[in-house]
């Protein structure tokens, strides 16, 4: 019974929708052969490959500088380069529209009209590559930090200089991890919707991707769910292939943990190159992170798009007093809190099940992580196809249950929870692996039943990882765009859909207010968490 209770939500709301999508897509493969579908696939491969290449070529050298050298301000730079992981890529896309719109972008006002043009496949690849850069930097940094110091010491004793040691020992060990991170950037870019829509649909000529093509089929009246399901199946196949390649690269990138006694990795002295490389790293951080976010705030103060005179808070005042925005904010906060609570509780349940149900528990944990591994468009399409009609269950010929999820916020909540369940499972599993079992054993020896021992001895040790899972899920869901655009019913706006509508069709300045407000919230949360972590006991 316990196994059934844990497996039922996954089977019904995660695995079944993906299975339905595969079945529906296989029955409508003709939709893949159209000229529009081929252009969408070509656009996805072009932009995703460009983003992955950009992140790899920039991320690996940055990881080396941040981890293995005496580069100034390394800790601050590392925090700045990882900031895009906490913010929606759509916000960075908005910032670059404000900066590099060919007619009214802030940079073009200084450099001359038409100097820069962020629209098109190159702009999409640049923005998504910058947002995916932390995936390469973090993967390569972790690998470099795990290098056995004795390997470098042996190379130095054999006469190799610092640069040669770095090139022939450390970099080859970090390269597979960086390639694995680049594969994840490709997957991240292929599944993105907001940036390709913002920078591709209005480009000349338009740049179509698989996600924007699905949006057109479902919501713009250009087709139906069946055709969109077939296109989403292509995206699922592409994602599965990339995940397999990433897994193989990760296995190849395993390095020996440091085991030498008293031996530490000595930072490579940059000498006269320290200041220039430090300036270059700061400039890259400024261009990729600070500049677009600053442009978002500046746009929210402009009287009209592209005009820098008479800056004021009129857009903030107007939008914050708009009932529609207030209602969307309440719905988003409520859904995000509910999804964060469900992810945290279910993640804990699956993590505990893994330790107590053996192979079944491990299979459930893997199944819980799968919805996050597939693109959000794929999961959203699967849920649309599965629950487009009411489900009726009759028990004993008398009792009837009706599951009516189509065009409701319940389906959005299910999508948020299924999509981010991996957060709860991973954090809870890591917390359980580090928990002290002797406290639970002591509680059992004192006569406490298993549940009481878990609540009193084990659960208090999991506060930090569970709080991290809750916070991460809440922040991610608060401005979630892809699932929201596909699943939110008409007249039930959320912050993500309002942001998308304002930026795409109506009022970029008002959209910048929403984006700027969310950036402030994220920075406040991250700063508060940093202060709590550093607070002395």
Image: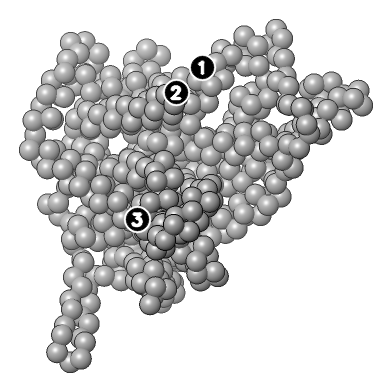
| Number of numbered tags placed on the structure image | 3
Residue 70 in the image, given as x and y percentages of width and height: 66, 16
Among numbered discs 2 and 3, the one appearing first in the sequence: 3
Q: Is residue 322 above or below residue 531?
A: below
User: Which residue lies most toward the bottom here?
Assistant: 397
Residue matched to label 3: 345
Measured Cα–Cα span from mark 1 to mark 2: 34 Å
What residue is at 19 percent from the left and 57 percent from the top? 409
Residue toward you, 39 or 502: 502
Which marked residue is nearer to the observer: mark 3 or mark 1?
3
Q: Position of residue 324 (x, y in %)?
A: 10, 40
Q: Which mark is residue 283?
A: 1
In percent of width and height, residue 260 lies at: 78, 34
Q: Is residue 103 visible?
A: no
Q: Is residue 316 left or right of residue 2?
A: left
**Mark 1 or 2, nearer chain start:** 1
Question: What residue is shown with label 2?
Answer: 536
Residue depth check, mark 1 versus mark 2: number of the one nearer the observer: 2
Q: Residue furthest right?
A: 158
Where residue 310 sits, quadrant-wise, is top left
Near mark 3 (Cα within 10 A), the count class, few <14, some 14-19 or many ≥20, is some
Pinpoint residue 14: horizontal percent, then vertical percent. 38, 65
Q: Which mark is residue 301?
A: none
Q: Are marks 3 and 1 in contact (CB under 8 Å)?
A: no
Residue found at the very far front of the displayed protein: 446
Residue at 56% of width from left, 55% of height from top? 243
Is 354 left, or right, of 182 in this rendering?
A: left
Quarter of the image where the N terminus is located: bottom left
Real-space CA distance between mark 2 and mark 3, rounded to the nearest whole angstrom: 29 Å
Whichever of labels 3 and 1 marks the residue nearer the N terminus, that label is 1
């Amino acid at each position: 019974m316990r196994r059934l209770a844990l497996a039922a939500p996954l089977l019904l709301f995660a695995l079944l929708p993906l299975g339905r999508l595969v079945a529906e897509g296989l029955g409508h493969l003709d939709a893949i052969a159209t000229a529009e579908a081929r252009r969408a696939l070509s656009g996805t491969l072009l932009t995703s490959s460009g983003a992955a290449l950009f992140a790899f070529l920039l991320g690996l050298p940055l990881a080396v500088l941040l981890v293995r050298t005496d580069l100034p301000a390394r800790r601050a730079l590392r925090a700045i380069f990882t900031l895009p992981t906490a913010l929606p890529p759509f916000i960075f896309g908005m910032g670059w529209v404000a900066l590099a719109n060919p007619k009214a972008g802030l940079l073009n006002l200084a450099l001359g009209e038409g100097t820069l043009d962020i629209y098109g496949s190159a702009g999409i690849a640049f923005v998504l590559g910058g947002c995916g850069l932390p995936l390469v930097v973090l993967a390569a940094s972790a690998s470099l930090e795990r290098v056995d110091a004795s390997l470098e010491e042996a190379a130095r004793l054999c006469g190799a200089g610092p640069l040669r040691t770095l090139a022939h020992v450390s970099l080859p060990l970090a390269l597979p991890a960086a390639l694995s991170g680049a594969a994840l950037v490709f997957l991240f870019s292929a599944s993105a919707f907001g940036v390709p829509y913002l920078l591709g649909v209005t480009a000349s000529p338009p740049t179509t991707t698989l996600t924007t093509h699905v949006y057109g089929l479902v919501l713009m009246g250009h087709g139906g769910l069946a055709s969109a399901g077939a296109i989403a199946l292509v995206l699922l196949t592409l994602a599965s292939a990339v995940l397999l390649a990433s897994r193989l690269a990760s296995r190849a990138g395993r390095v020996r943990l440091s085991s030498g006694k008293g031996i530490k990795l000595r930072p490579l002295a940059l000498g006269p190159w320290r200041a220039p490389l430090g300036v270059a790293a700061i400039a890259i951080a400024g261009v990729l992170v600070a500049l677009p976010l600053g442009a978002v705030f500046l746009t929210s103060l402009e009287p009209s798009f592209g005009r820098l005179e008479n800056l004021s808070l009129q857009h903030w005042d107007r939008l914050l007093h708009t009932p529609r925005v207030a209602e969307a904010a309440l719905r988003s906060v409520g859904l995000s809190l509910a999804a964060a609570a469900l992810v945290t509780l279910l993640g804990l349940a699956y993590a505990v099940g893994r330790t107590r149900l053996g192979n079944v528990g491990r299979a459930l944990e893997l199944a819980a992580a799968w919805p996050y591994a597939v693109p959000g468009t794929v999961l959203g399409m699967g849920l649309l196809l599965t629950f487009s009609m009411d489900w009726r269950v009759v028990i004993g010929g008398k009792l009837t249950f009706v599951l009516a999820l189509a065009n409701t916020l319940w389906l959005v909540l299910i999508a948020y929870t299924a999509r981010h369940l991996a957060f709860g499972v991973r954090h809870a599993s890591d917390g359980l692996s580090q928990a002290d079992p002797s406290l639970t054993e002591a509680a059992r020896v004192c006569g406490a039943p298993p549940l009481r021992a878990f609540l009193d001895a084990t659960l208090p040790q999991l506060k930090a990882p569970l709080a991290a899972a809750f916070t991460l899920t809440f922040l991610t869901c608060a401005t979630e765009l892809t699932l929201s655009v596909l699943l939110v019913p008409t007249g039930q706006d959320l912050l993500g859909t309002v942001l998308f509508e304002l930026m795409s069709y109506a009022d970029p300045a008002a959209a910048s207010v929403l984006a700027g407000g969310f950036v402030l919230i994220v920075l406040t949360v991250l700063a508060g968490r940093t202060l709590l972590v550093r607070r002395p006991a």
